Image (spheres, grey):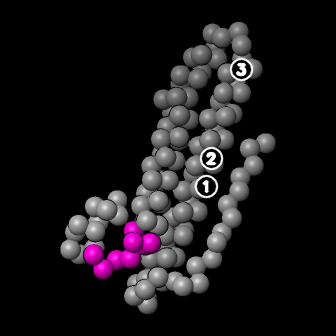
Amino acid sequence: MWKFALLRDELKEVPVELLITISSSYKATHDAQIASELIGPSSFNKFLKEFSVTTDKQSLLKDLKLDVQNAHMKARFASFLLENTVSETAYYLKTGEMNPERTQVEFSISLD
């Protein structure tokens, strides 16, 4: 995204770091949306049909659990990146520069 943005005159003054931050949040949001479709209404109907005919209900439930955990993790990660994007963008709009005191943040999720 940042390579494309640099070609546009109105974005040439936006720091590459901010463009990367924005691009990362868009990608994470897209990934979360795709993962959530695996547990959406149409997928739930498919799950119910499979559950009613399968003899291996445990395996089907384990797969569902993994899909839900994956969607949850991606949604949390997207939320984290979106909050960071809002913060970085607000700082840039206020000061006209990137925050020099940007801190490294650790993000962890347990899939127990």
Residue most extreme to the right: 112
* Residue 60, picture quadrant: top right
Of 57 and 66, the residue lying toward us: 66
**Tag 2's secondary structure?**
helix
In the rendered image, residue 111, in percent from the top left (x then y), is placed at 74, 44
Report if the CB atoms under discs 2 and 3 are less than 8 Å apart. no
The local crowd at label 3, few if under 14, some if 14 to 19, many if 20 or more residues have their Cα within 10 Å, is few
Report if the CB atoms under discs 2 and 1 are less than 8 Å apart. yes
Q: Distance between the Cα atoms at labels 3 and 1? A: 26 Å
In the rendered image, residue 16, in percent from the top left (x then y), is placed at 39, 72
Residues rendered magenta in the picture: 12-19
Kind of residue at disc 1:
Arg
For the point 49% across and 37% down, the residue is: 37
Apparent side of residue 1 relative to residue 44 in the rendered image (left or right): left
* Residue 14, picture quadrant: bottom left
In the rendered image, residue 25, in percent from the top left (x then y), is placed at 47, 60
Q: Which residue is mark 2?
A: 72
Q: Which mark is residue 59?
A: 3
Q: Where is 19 relative to 48, above or below?
A: below
Q: Distance between the Cα atoms at labels 2 and 3? A: 20 Å
Q: Which residue is mark 1?
A: 76
For the point 39% across and 88% down, the residue is: 96
Of 61 and 16, the residue lying toward us: 16
Residue most extreme to the left: 9
Chain-order first, disc 3 or disc 1: 3
The local crowd at label 2, few if under 14, some if 14 to 19, many if 20 or more residues have their Cα within 10 Å, is some
Kind of residue at disc 3:
Ser
